Structures are given as structure tokens and as C-alpha cells.
């Protein structure tokens, strides 16, 4: 098991490298660079910028160096000093702007994942065990609609309903009175009470997908001979189903978590914008719109890295869960 | 059945009908099968693929998967002491408490594919000990200890190590031994084995057959052994039941069936087995025709379309009743002479006319 | 083991039904239906036809395709025509019978009475029951150029008087007719889905095919790339890439750029499907048999592998389209996808970003309903094709599949 973990950890390195390259590419892609944008802003404010000053700035940021030299400077800054660069828009270090919001994104993504699981598991099992029942049809239909409705649509509808019928405008995970308060029990409770609606909204598509995966897997497994074997031992039906086919059906289910995470993070971006949550989503869109590329690139980098770590965790969970994977890798290593 | 033999019958199947209900048709996998398993005896059920052997084996424990269902007949399980009345397993609900109490404890089953019939993500010990924990409320630790003993008993080398391994780490023969150990766990009175050796190579097959024979002798349980292999029958059976299209056409002691087959189908099956010492010039006889296609179930005797001796005007109109040509023998053929079997009533006669209970 | 198929299926009968002989017609029907007697396509089509949600989905899909082809004719107006007096005008109810004086058959809507708040300049609308705007079919209305080629002014539905406008689904911030905009948006959103899928199909087929055919190191490399692309959150990446599309590009250029960006990330699923089918088919007995019979590689692939393959490809393609549509909608919604003069469902939804707009004019959310319907029916159809192509993919083969209903 330990060798598998190490192998899997090593395997992460090239992926993280590729993600950092892509993130840096995003920083570099737009025509011009943050300096041209900065100059444009300065001239818009009526301040003249002379060529010497530009050259000095170019020198300082190494903007004329080759791609990989710039990349190296950027990534080594991050790895060695935790320095993600400067946000041109806020005139503050990117790291300061980002970490708070990443914490909330993480909280949101993890709670969404847990809630999706909690909903998808019983519904998926029920839907498969009672195939073609009224409940199965209902679950399947709701699942289809959940998959087909963009998350931000749900958020918009929710916003409209709460405005129309409850007269309040939604927004924010942290209520106004707690914004500047230090973390205490009250603030945590407040966050939790504000969290469940965005969590539900972000989770719909993922939950629907999970239900469908679990149902299909379980339908396959329910017909397998080992289920009959278990039944032939005289186990109660629920115990037969939970101990054997469900256990088997959960293996692919667990591995889908790795694929669900990117979707959750992406969905979070859109929903947060609609519901104006203080997560990375609005920050990312804002920075992309304003070509605040160091901020945008860093957010993409961190979100990507978090997803890779999530995938790693789901792989390790799978290896713990399914002895076949555990032993297969042991033999191979 | 003769009254003198009733005392040692442990499982008596009478007029069993198991049908599969599809959207627009009913498939009669088992349609009026009768047979009896004796205490400490091995009854082999033989027949071509699709004759309903497997469905019958599953019917005993009500393990037929939907859309299939036991729709008629009786499966009488006699208790160990003759005093109590037998339990009719066919009348129990497939998911009910009463059939669950029988499964694994009084009647156990061994399946064909040891690889797919075992869970790959649970340890061998867990799976063997499970019925002990369910039926006898044994603790996890005790069940594991008992599992080691059971593995020893089915001659698995290194049982202490195997008990904690997973089925995918074992060979095919070992897996089948694990299956058998699992079935033996609660000391059942009847063991139903559904082609347990078909998926194994010949050497392993012989070992497993030996094991079955020894276990039957040691425990005195009755074995219902499903196979399509006449060689297996010759090796292990005390009695043979020959199935064709869902009915048992002939049952009797193995020697008598092999040396004096009465039903034309039994004769044809035996002639189709290659033998050493028979001149090569002779072609191996085959049964003419094929199992009737869906939708063309013959009227009267089900075998008449392939029977070389079929009599027109008789075999195609009358459903053959059971006749008893000798002690312990039963044949379902109109061309057989002998007293009719009084114990099996009209419920055993499969006809196209009788109503099928559809709910 | 399930029941063996060799057994004769007899007609089901109630316990009290009069015994009737097994009808010979039933027998023959079920016999002609045995697999092997009919070509695979026919079987697939038959199974597909039995899947009711899929058939319903296919019908709705046809409608959507027709709408995107004949948008100009089907829309009551044009998407760009604005009217400052109709800002956020609510939908007008279509009446069919006028009972105000006697009985008058014919479609009409009531005009608005507009009041402008002098401070906020917001219009408030009340239905003016005295002013009727007659509505007709095949009316002459605002001129358009069909597919940018043929000038015309015939509309399927619209006000009989070319100088009047109807707002069946309300109007947006600039008093533009939502119904017309949604119809035109259908064309853009559906076509960007199809174009994106076509592009990722080429990428997926080539790379997936190479991966499955060559195997070894190439396969390994391509698989790593796919895993990498699948492990990063797509929406932030899409956003990053689309943000790089220059703002001064024209509508067509942006459209193409967005399509390319969508398919650059979307091909992975298709490649996996193609590769997986390739690998599993290569080991099938019938492929080995064909090879042993002396068929060349081309014949093995073309005659033996592809036929059992195409329906899977079609299914995955169908299932990939909604994915693309959702992606385009999300990007445009954020203002990072298609830009304003182009009308797509996502662009339309951009109008609904503001809570006050939604509160004032909830009909701005209607393009979202269009997205949901389109994605839903595409999913139904895709699932239907997949299940029809491979009846064993879910829950094992059902017995009933052998006999037609």
C-alpha cells in the first residue's frame, strides 16, 4: 500500500507541472502584458508614462526574457517564497487576495461533494433495486433534469424566487455583521446556515450524475452470480444488497469523484458569481475581464492543483476500498 | 414412489413448475419435474443445455431471478427426525424469513463459476463464516476460526493463510473448494450443486468430485448434483434423473439407468457418449433433430419430435403419465409398460392446457 | 443463469382465460425477430423506437433543428429590432377567440398601456383591453435575409399590421422581442454545439484511434494527456483561454475561436470511447475469426469492426452536444464567450445576471429553459441510441427484448 501511495504521489508531479504550464500560458496568452494594461490605465488617468519608465519596468519584471525564463521566475517565486506575483488591479500581492477565497471555495466544494454523496447514495441504490418502479422513474427524471439545467440557471431561479416571494436578495456566505469579525462559533454557524443553498445548487448536476452512475453500476452488479451466492446463504435481502453488489458498485462510484471534482470547482465559479459568494469564482472572472493575468493564472493554478490533490485522495480511497487495486499494484511494483 | 423408500428421502420435488414471465410470453423452464433426493445419496440431474436443470436447482431455494418464479408443484424438505411434517419450500415467499432460515443452514448451494460466484472484495474467511454468523449468531472471531477448519476439511493447503486472502488470489480449483466450504459451514442436510465442475480442468474436476463423494459419506447429507456430463454421472451418482424440456423423463439408480435405460431419450443420450473399445468404424450416434425452437413446444410427449420410436396418434396426443417399471424407477413414456405411479397426482402432468397462474 | 432462450415462449394467459392454442402467428412473429435474421441497424432502430423518452426527445430535437434552420421565417420579428417604448415589456397573452362583442374567431393580443416613471425612467405596463393587435399566420413583417442570402419578409406568426409588434415572450432591456431572440439564439447555440462536437470528433477519432490502434508508447502518451485534461477544472480553463480571444475580433472569428476552445478540451471523452471500443473489439472472437479468414486490416476494420462501433460513436456524439451547449452557455453568460451582437442562449442569459432585471422581468430566464430542454432531449436521444446499440450495457439483457411489443 505504501509503495502505491508513493508511486501515485510521484505520478502527480508531471500533472502539476503541466497545470502550472497551462496556467502560465493563460497569463502569457493575451496580447500585450500586464504592463501595457498598466500603462493604458495610467494614461487613462492622465498620467504620462515616458519610455524610460517603461523600459525600467520591463527590466524589473523581465518581460523581454524568453517564455521559459519568465516561467521559471514565476514558478520558483511561488514554490520558494509563496510569491504569486502582484495583482495589477488591486496593487496587492496575489497571495493576499487569493487564500481567503480559496478557503471558502474548498469548504464549498467539499461540502458539496459530501452532500452529493449523501443524496446520491440512497437514491441510486433505491433506483437500481426498485428498477422500473414509480420511484425509479421519478428519480431518473429528476436526475435528467438536474443534469440538463445549468447550475447558474438554478442559482438565478433561486435568486428570483427568494427575491420575489421572500423579499430578500441573496448573496454572501458570510453575513454582513460577521464580515470583519474574527472566526468564532457564531460566525461558523452563520456560514453553515448560508452555505447549504449554494451547496445544493452546485451539487445538483454532480448529484444527478452520481445517481446515474451508481444506478447503472448497481444494475450490472445485481445480476452477478455472487449476489445469488450471498442470497443462498440465507442473508436478509437488504444485507445481501448492501454488503455485496453495493460494495462492488461503489468502486467505479468512488473513482468518479476524481472526475466530479473539476465539475464542482467549475460549477462553483458560475454559481458564486450569480449568488455573489466570496469565493474564487468572481475573483477569477473579474481578473480575466480586466486582464489581471497574474491573479487569474494563480487562481487557475491553485484550483487545478487542488483538483489534482482531490483526484489523488479519491484514488487512495479507492485503493483502500477495493483490494483488487491494492494487490494489483503491489504485484506490479 | 414406493412407501418403503420414503423414510430416507430428504428432498422430494413433485410437479415443480418454474416459469419465466416476459413481456409477452411465458417460458416454461421447469414444467412438471419430479425427483427425490435420498439421505446420504447423490442424485445426478442430466440433460442438454436449456432443459431446465439450473432453473430447477435454483427453485429449490427460491433463488430464481425475476422475471422467473416458482408457479406450482411442491418441494418437500423432510426434517432429520421423521416425526415432523415436511416443509414445502415451493410455498415459501422468495424473500421471506422462513426460506432464509432454510438457505445455507438446511439446504446449501454450490454454483458453477467459482470466480464470479464469490465476491472479489471480501476475504475468503468472511464469506465462509458469514452463514455461521447469520444462522448461529457466531462472533466474527469464532466464525473465522471455523472457516479455517472448514478450509482444512475441503483440503485447502495453508488454510490459515488462505482464510485472509481474496478469491482473485486463488486458483480455480481452490475457489471451488472455498465455495464448497462455504456451503458446508452450517452442516446442511441437502447440498445442491449446479454444475460445480464444469468450469474446471479435468484433473481439478476429478479432485473436486472425490471431495464431494467423501463429504457426502462423512456428513450423510443428500446431494442434488446438476451436470450435463455423463462421465461425471458415472463417477459420482447413486441415482440419475434425466431431464428434457423442463420435465424429468426418467429417474432411477445409476446402474439400472446406464444398463437398462427405458426412455428413448435416455437411450439416445447414453449412445451419444464416446466409449473406449467400440470399433472406430462406427459413427458416434447423435440425437436426431434439435431441441424444439421457441414457440414450437410439441403436444403430447415433449420428446416425440426427436424420438425414433414415436407412435403417431398416440405420442402426439397423450401426455405420458409416470410409470414404475421397477423399484425406485420412474419413467414418463407411453411406450413403457408398468404400473402407474399412484403417489404423484395429476398435478404432475404437464399439459399445454392447464392454466398458468399469472398475477 | 437466466432462463435459457431455447425455451418456447408461449403467450401469457390469465388463469381463467379460455385455453386457446398457441397462435401460429405469434410463433412466426417471434421467429422472424430472432437476432441474426435482421441487420443490426434494423434491430437498433427497433429497440430505439421502443424507448419512449428517446423517441419523444428525437421529435423535439427535430423541431429544434428546424427552428435553427428556418429561424428567420419562424421568428415573429428580428433579434436586433429595438423599441425604447417597450423596455422590459411583459409577455402578451395570445387570444384565439374574441367574445367582447359577439363571437369573433381569430388570433390577437392586447396592446400595452405604457406609463413612464419620470424619476427612474422605468416603464410600467398594463394590458389595454381596448386596443387589439390582430395576429396572423404567414404575415408580412420585418424584412430579413434568409441565411444571409435571400431577402424576404414572410413570418410564420406576427402582427397582421407590419407596423405593429407583438411580444409573445416579452421584451428585454432594449425592448427587443425575446421570442425572436430565443429563436435566433437556437441557431447559434445548436450550431456551436454541433460544430464543437464535429471538431472534437475529428480530434477524438484520430487520437483515440491512434491510441487504440498503435498501442504501446503512443497509447500511453495520449492517455496521460487525456487524464491530464480531464483532471483540471474545465470551466476556469475555458475561461482563461476565452479571455485570451481578442475583443476586437469579429463575430465569426469569435464564434470559431470559441468552438476551437470548446473542442480542444472536449475531445477527451470521445477519444476514450473510441479507444476503448477499439481495444475491446480487437479482442472479440469475431474479429479474430475475420482475421483468421484472411481478411485484410482494412476489411477487418471496415466490414467487421466499424458496424458494431458506429452506433456507439453516434451515441457519444449525441451525448457530447449538450455538454458543448452547456459550456458555450456558461462562457457567454460570464461574458467570456460570444459577444453581444451575436445572439446565443448564453448571450441572452447575460441579460439576466442582475437580480433586479430578473425581479422585473423573469421572462429573461426563458433562454435558460431553452437550454434545459435542448440538453434534456439530446441526453434522452443519446441514451436511447446507446441503449439500442448495446442492450447489455445496463442491467443485462432483458428477455423481453427479443420480442416486439
Image (tube, rainbow, N blue to C red):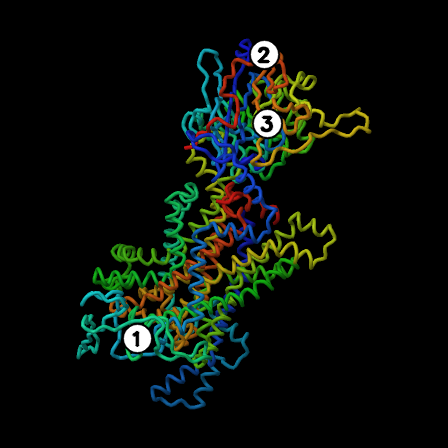
* Disc 2, SS: loop
Let me know if marks 3 and 1 both belong to one chain.
Answer: no
Q: Nearer the viewer, mark 2 or mark 1?
A: 1
Question: How far is mark 2 from mark 1, CA to CA?
Answer: 95 Å
Q: Is residue C44 above or below residue B137?
A: below
Q: CA distance from mark 3 to mark 1?
A: 77 Å
Q: Nearer the viewer, residue C322 or B306?
A: B306
Q: Which quarter of the figure has residue C297?
A: bottom right
User: In the rendered structure, the residue with mark 1 lies on which chain?
Assistant: C
Q: What crowding class fits label 1: few (fewer than 14 Cα within 10 Å), some (14-19), or many (20 or more)?
A: many
Which of A329/B118 is in front? Answer: B118
In the picture, the disc for residue B339 is 2
Q: Which residue is mark 1?
A: C160
Q: Nearer the viewer, residue A96 or C100?
A: C100
Discs 3, 2 touching: Cβ within 8 Å: no
Residues marked 2 and 1, same chain: no
Secondary element at image label 3: loop
In which quarter of the view is residue A101 placed?
bottom left
Left or right, residue A70 beside residue B287: left
Amino acid at each position: 500500500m505504501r509503495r502505491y501511495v508513493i508511486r501515485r504521489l510521484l505520478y502527480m508531479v508531471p500533472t502539476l507541472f503541466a497545470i502550472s504550464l497551462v496556467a502560465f500560458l493563460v497569463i502569457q496568452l493575451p496580447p500585450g502584458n500586464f504592463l501595457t494594461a498598466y500603462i493604458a490605465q495610467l494614461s487613462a488617468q492622465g498620467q504620462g508614462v515616458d519610455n524610460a519608465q517603461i523600459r525600467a519596468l520591463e527590466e524589473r519584471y523581465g518581460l523581454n526574457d524568453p517564455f521559459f525564463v519568465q516561467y521559471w521566475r514565476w514558478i520558483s517565486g511561488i514554490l520558494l517564497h509563496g510569491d504569486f506575483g502582484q495583482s495589477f488591479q488591486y496593487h496587492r500581492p496575489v497571495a493576499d487576495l487569493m487564500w481567503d477565497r480559496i478557503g471558502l471555495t474548498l469548504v464549498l466544494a467539499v461540502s458539496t461533494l459530501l452532500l452529493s454523496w449523501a443524496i446520491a447514495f440512497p437514491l441510486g441504490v433505491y433506483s437500481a433495486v426498485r428498477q422500473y418502479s414509480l420511484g425509479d422513474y421519478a428519480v431518473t427524471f429528476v436526475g435528467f433534469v438536474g443534469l440538463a439545467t445549468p447550475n447558474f440557471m438554478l442559482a438565478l431561479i433561486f435568486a428570483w424566487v427568494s427575491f420575489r416571494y421572500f423579499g430578500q436578495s441573496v448573496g454572501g456566505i458570510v453575513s454582513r455583521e460577521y464580515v470583519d469579525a474574527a472566526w468564532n462559533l457564531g460566525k461558523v454557524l452563520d456560514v453553515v446556515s448560508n452555505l447549504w443553498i449554494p451547496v445544493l445548487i452546485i451539487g445538483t448536476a454532480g448529484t444527478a450524475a452520481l445517481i446515474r452512475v451508481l444506478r447503472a453500476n448497481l444494475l450490472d452488479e445485481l445480476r452477478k452470480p455472487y449476489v445469488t451466492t450471498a442470497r443462498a446463504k440465507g442473508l436478509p435481502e437488504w444485507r445481501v444488497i448492501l454488503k455485496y453488489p453495493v460494495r462492488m458498485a461503489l468502486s467505479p462510484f468512488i473513482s468518479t469523484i476524481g472526475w466530479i471534482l473539476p465539475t464542482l470547482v467549475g460549477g462553483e465559479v458560475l454559481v458564486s458569481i450569480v449568488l455573489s459568494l466570496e469565493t474564487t469564482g468572481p475573483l477569477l472572472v473579474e481578473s480575466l475581464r480586466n486582464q489581471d493575468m497574474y491573479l487569474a493564472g494563480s487562481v487557475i493554478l491553485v484550483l487545478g492543483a487542488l483538483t489534482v490533490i482531490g483526484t489523488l485522495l479519491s484514488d487512495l480511497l479507492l485503493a483502500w476500498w477495493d483490494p483488487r487495486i491494492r494487490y494489483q499494484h503491489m504485484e506490479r511494483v | 414412489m414406493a412407501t418403503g423408500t420414503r423414510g430416507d428421502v430428504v428432498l422430494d420435488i413433485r410437479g415443480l413448475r418454474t416459469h419465466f414471465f416476459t413481456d409477452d410470453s411465458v417460458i416454461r423452464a421447469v414444467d412438471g419435474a419430479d425427483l427425490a433426493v435420498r439421505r446420504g445419496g447423490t442424485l445426478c440431474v442430466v440433460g442438454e443445455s436449456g432443459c431446465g436443470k439450473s432453473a430447477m436447482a435454483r427453485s429449490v431455494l427460491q433463488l430464481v431471478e425475476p422475471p422467473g418464479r416458482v408457479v406450482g408443484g411442491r418441494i418437500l424438505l423432510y426434517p432429520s427426525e421423521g416425526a415432523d411434517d415436511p416443509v414445502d419450500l415451493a410455498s415459501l415467499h422468495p424473500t421471506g424469513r422462513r426460506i432464509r432460515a432454510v438457505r445455507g443452514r438446511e439446504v446449501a448451494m454450490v454454483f458453477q463459476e467459482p470466480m464470479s460466484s464469490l465476491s472479489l472484495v471480501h476475504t475468503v474467511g468472511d464469506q465462509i463464516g458469514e452463514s455461521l454468523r447469520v444462522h448461529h449468531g457466531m462472533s466474527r472471531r469464532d466464525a473465522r476460526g471455523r472457516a479455517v477448519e472448514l478450509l482444512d476439511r475441503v483440503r485447502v493447503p495453508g488454510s490459515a493463510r488462505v482464510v485472509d486472502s481474496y478469491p482473485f488470489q486463488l486458483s480455480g480449483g481452490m475457489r471451488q473448494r472455498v465455495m464448497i466450504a462455504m456451503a458446508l459451514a452450517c452442516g446442511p442436510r441437502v447440498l445442491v450443486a449446479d454444475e460445480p465442475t464444469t468450469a474446471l480442468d479435468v484433473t481439478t474436476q476429478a479432485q473436486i468430485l472425490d471431495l464431494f463423494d467423501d463429504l457426502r459419506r462423512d456428513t450423510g447429507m443428500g446431494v442434488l448434483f446438476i451436470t450435463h456430463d455423463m462421465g461425471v454421472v458415472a463417477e459420482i451418482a447413486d441415482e440419475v434423473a434425466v431431464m428434457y424440456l423442463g420435465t424429468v423423463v426418467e429417474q432411477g439408480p445409476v446402474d439400472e439407468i446406464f444398463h437398462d435405460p427405458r426412455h428413448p431419450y435416455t437411450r439416445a443420450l447414453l449412445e451419444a457418449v464416446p466409449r473406449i473399445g467400440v470399433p472406430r468404424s462406427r459413427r458416434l450416434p447423435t440425437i436426431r433433430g434439435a431441441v424444439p425452437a421457441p414457440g414450437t413446444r410439441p403436444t403430447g410427449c415433449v420428446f416425440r419430435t426427436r424420438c425414433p420410436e414415436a407412435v403417431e396418434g398416440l405420442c402426439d396426443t397423450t401426455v405420458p403419465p409416470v410409470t414404475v417399471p421397477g423399484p425406485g424407477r420412474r419413467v414418463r413414456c407411453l411406450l413403457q409398460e408398468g404400473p402407474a405411479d399412484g403417489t404423484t397426482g395429476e398435478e404432475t402432468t404437464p399439459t399445454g392446457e392447464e392454466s398458468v397462474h399469472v398475477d | 443463469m437466466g432462463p435459457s432462450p431455447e425455451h418456447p415462449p408461449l403467450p401469457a394467459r390469465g388463469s381463467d382465460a379460455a385455453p386457446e392454442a398457441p397462435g401460429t402467428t405469434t410463433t412466426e412473429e417471434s421467429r422472424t425477430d430472432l437476432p441474426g435474421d435482421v441487420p443490426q441497424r434494423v434491430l437498433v432502430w427497433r429497440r430505439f423506437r421502443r424507448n419512449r423518452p428517446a423517441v419523444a426527445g428525437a421529435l423535439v430535437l427535430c423541431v429544434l433543428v428546424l427552428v435553427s434552420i428556418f429561424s428567420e421565417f419562424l421568428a415573429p420579428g428580428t433579434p436586433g429590432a429595438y423599441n425604447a417604448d417597450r423596455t422590459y415589456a411583459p409577455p402578451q397573452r395570445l387570444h384565439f377567440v374574441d367574445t367582447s362583442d359577439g363571437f369573433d374567431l381569430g388570433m390577437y393580443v392586447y396592446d400595452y398601456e405604457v406609463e413612464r416613471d419620470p424619476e427612474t425612467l422605468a416603464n410600467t405596463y398594463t394590458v389595454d383591453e381596448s386596443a387589439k393587435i390582430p395576429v396572423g399566420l404567414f404575415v408580412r413583417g420585418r424584412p430579413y435575409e434568409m441565411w444571409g442570402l435571400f431577402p424576404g419578409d414572410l413570418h410564420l406568426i406576427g402582427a397582421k399590421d407590419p407596423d405593429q409588434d407583438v411580444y409573445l415572450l416579452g421584451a428585454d432591456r432594449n425592448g427587443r422581442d425575446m421570442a425572436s431572440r430565443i429563436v435566433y439564439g437556437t441557431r447559434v447555440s445548436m450550431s456551436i454545439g454541433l460544430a464543437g462536437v464535429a471538431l472534437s470528433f475529428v480530434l477524438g477519432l484520430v487520437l483515440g484511434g491512434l491510441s487504440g490502434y498503435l498501442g504501446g508508447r503512443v497509447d500511453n502518451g495520449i492517455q496521460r494527456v487525456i487524464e491530464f485534461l480531464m483532471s483540471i477544472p474545465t470551466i476556469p480553463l475555458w475561461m482563461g483561454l476565452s479571455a485570451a480571444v481578442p475583443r476586437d475580433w469579429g463575430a465569426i472569428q469569435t464564434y470559431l475561436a470559441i468552438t476551437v476552445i470548446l473542442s480542444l478540451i472536449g475531445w477527451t471523452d470521445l477519444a476514450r470511447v473510441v479507444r476503448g471500443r477499439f481495444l475491446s473489439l480487437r479482442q472479440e472472437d469475431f474479429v479474430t475469426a475475420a482475421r483468421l479468414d484472411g481478411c485484410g486490416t482494412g476489411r477487418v476494420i471496415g466490414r467487421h469492426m466499424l458496424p458494431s462501433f458506429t452506433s456507439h460513436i453516434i451515441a457519444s456524439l449525441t451525448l457530447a452536444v449538450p455538454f458543448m451547449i452547456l459550456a458555450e452557455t456558461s462562457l457567454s453568460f460570464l461574458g467570456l464567450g460570444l459577444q453581444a451582437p451575436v445572439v446565443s442562449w448564453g448571450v441572452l442569459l447575460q441579460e439576466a445576471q442582475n437580480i433586479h432585471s430578473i425581479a422585473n422581468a423573469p421572462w429573461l430566464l426563458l433562454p435558460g429553459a431553452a437550454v434545459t430542454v435542448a440538453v434534456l432531449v439530446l441526453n434522452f436521444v443519446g441514451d436511447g441510441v446507446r441503449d439500442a446499440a448495446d442492450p447489455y450495457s445496463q442491467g443485462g439483457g432483458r428477455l423481453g427484448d427479443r420480442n416486439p411489443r
